[in-house]
Amino acid sequence: MFRLTASWGENWHSNHDTYWQQQDIAFGGTPATGTSKDAANRSVDAIFGSNFADGKGNVTGFFSYFHTDRSRVLTATGAAARRVRCSMPTAT
């Protein structure tokens, strides 16, 4: 028996929300604009196995690989390290 699976993905950002862009400016940031793609990821998985000794034994093995690129948007803006303060009103 042998099975192989693979996948690929990427974050696609459509940065056209003016409300959140204004919030970023209000907190001293530089908002992302336009469309961008980053943080591509790839994975490959394989599983293999076999019976032996007239079906009395079995051996199974697997291999997995996963890689994700760094987010260019978060790295360029420093947003990954930015702290955000949130508060909620208290009910009385």
Image (cartoon, rainbow, N blue to C red):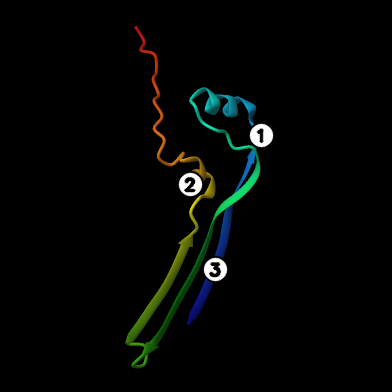
What x and y, as percent, mark residue 60? 37, 79
Distance CA(mark 3)–CA(mark 1):
32 Å
Of tags 2 and 3, the one toward the viewer is 2
The residue at the far bottom in this view is 53
Q: Which one is nearer the viewer's eye here, 47 or 65?
A: 65
Front: mark 3 or 1: 1
- Circle 2 residues within 10 Å: few <14, some 14–19, many ≥20: few
Badge 1, how many Cα within 10 Å: few under 14, some, many 20+? few
Mark number for residue 75?
A: 2
Sequence-wise, the earlier of marks 2 and 1 is: 1
Amino acid beneath label 1: His
- For residue 80, side relative to residue 10 (left or right): left
Q: Is residue 83 above or below residue 68?
A: above
Q: Which residue is mark 3?
A: 6
Q: Which residue is mark 1?
A: 16
Q: Is residue 29 left or right of residue 32?
A: left
Nearest the eye: 80 or 77: 77
Q: Looking at the picture, how far across and down is residue 5, in whole percent?
A: 53, 70
Of the residues shown, which amino acid type is indicated by label 2? Thr
Task: Identify the secondary structure beneath mark 2.
Answer: helix
Residue at figure coordinates x 40%, y 75% from the top left: 62
Separation (CA) of disc 2 from disc 3: 27 Å
Residue 81 sits in quarter: top left
